[in-house]
Amino acid sequence: MHGILFPFGLIILAGVAFRRMRPSGVEAGAMSQAINAGVLNLFLPALCIKTMYQSTIDHHALLVPATACVTTLTALLLAAGTYSLLSKKLQLAPQEKGVVLLAAAFGNVTYLGLPVITGLFGQSAAQYALYYDLLATTPLLWLVGATMAARCGGDREYDIPSALKTIVSLPPVWGIFAGMALNLTRATLPPFMVSALDMLGGLVVPLMIFSIGLALTFPKVAHAFAVLPAVVIKLALSPFISFLAAKTLGLSGTALTSTVLEGAMPSMVLTLLVAGRYNLDISLGAFMIVVTTTLSFFTLPAILYLVGV
């Protein structure tokens, strides 16, 4: 695990350095936006098509997303209950509480999870990360997470049809179903097209890791201590929930380990997008991402050891 995380750490630090040094005058925000747009609209869909086209589609396409749903929703409920009890003592505003709940429940299952899983188990394991994210975590983020964020933000009404439109319009979602369709119909793609998809998909991992470094900030947060319960839920309780759910549903081997690791991922970078849209405290969300991402370099190897790999 450390042999995978250390190179990732260097790439993340390169992103942090780029943010501070701004070579050629390029702003980190503009670079991050361009990278995210490229990954979302081209590179990740290509990876989805290639992975699903070459994978064996079986019961994991249902069990992994089911585990992800149980893990994410349980973590969200635990965080909501915990912060309801502590909100007066911590003196958290609704905008602060909302962003901490998002960070406690939703993990960085693609931007960090996909590289970690493929680094450990090879490209064939990418399907588990894609199932976990695109068939569960992302829909839940826009349906359940955005509902909660809208209520905490208080300035915008939540529009379910718009959320569904957002989910349906995501290119990686189309990519995963296109790859499945090609697989199930036993279609044969020309070798040059498979090679093109492979080259495009190969850019996802380094770009995602570098983008994490660009997104990490170290803000001054008045309620920094308030993230402690959320950190415990995200990095300790969430993988435990994922393990119980995965075992109960019958997952084993690489599918089990990959799913548990996805449950152990640090807070999702894309929660900042939801936080900004619904007027939550973005600086506190960024702080949560920094803390959980840093700690994950220690907790992920521990989780991997406990799972037994």
Image (spheres, helix red, strand yellow):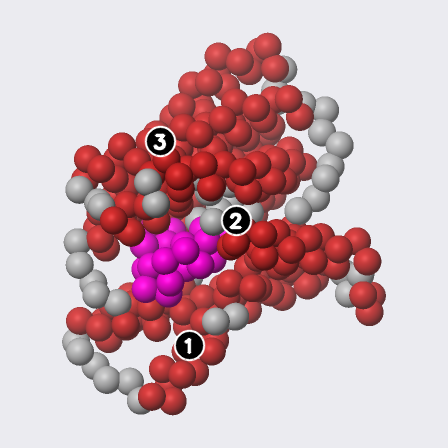
Instruction: Classify 10 Å Cα crowding around label 1: few (below 14), some (14-19), many (20 and above).
Output: some
Q: Nearer the viewer, residue 307 or 227?
A: 307
Q: Verify whether residue 117 appears in magenta.
A: yes
Q: Verify whether residue 253 appears in magenta.
A: no
Which residue is located at x 46 percent, y 53 percent?
116
CA distance for labels 1 and 3 = 34 Å
Which residue is located at x 37 percent, y 35 percent?
306
Instruction: Classify 10 Å Cα crowding around label 3: few (below 14), some (14-19), many (20 and above).
Output: many
The residue beneath circle 2 is 2
Q: Quadrant of residue 226?
A: top right
- What secondary structure do most residues of the magenta stretch adopt? helix
Specify the segment rendered in magenta. 110-134
The quadrant of the rendering that contains the C terminus is top left
For label 3, the SS is helix
Give the number of the mark in front: 1 or 2: 2
The residue beneath circle 3 is 240
Mark positioned earlier in the residue sequence (1 or 2): 2
Say what amino acid the circle numbered 1 marks: Asp
Mark positioned earlier in the residue sequence (1 or 3): 1
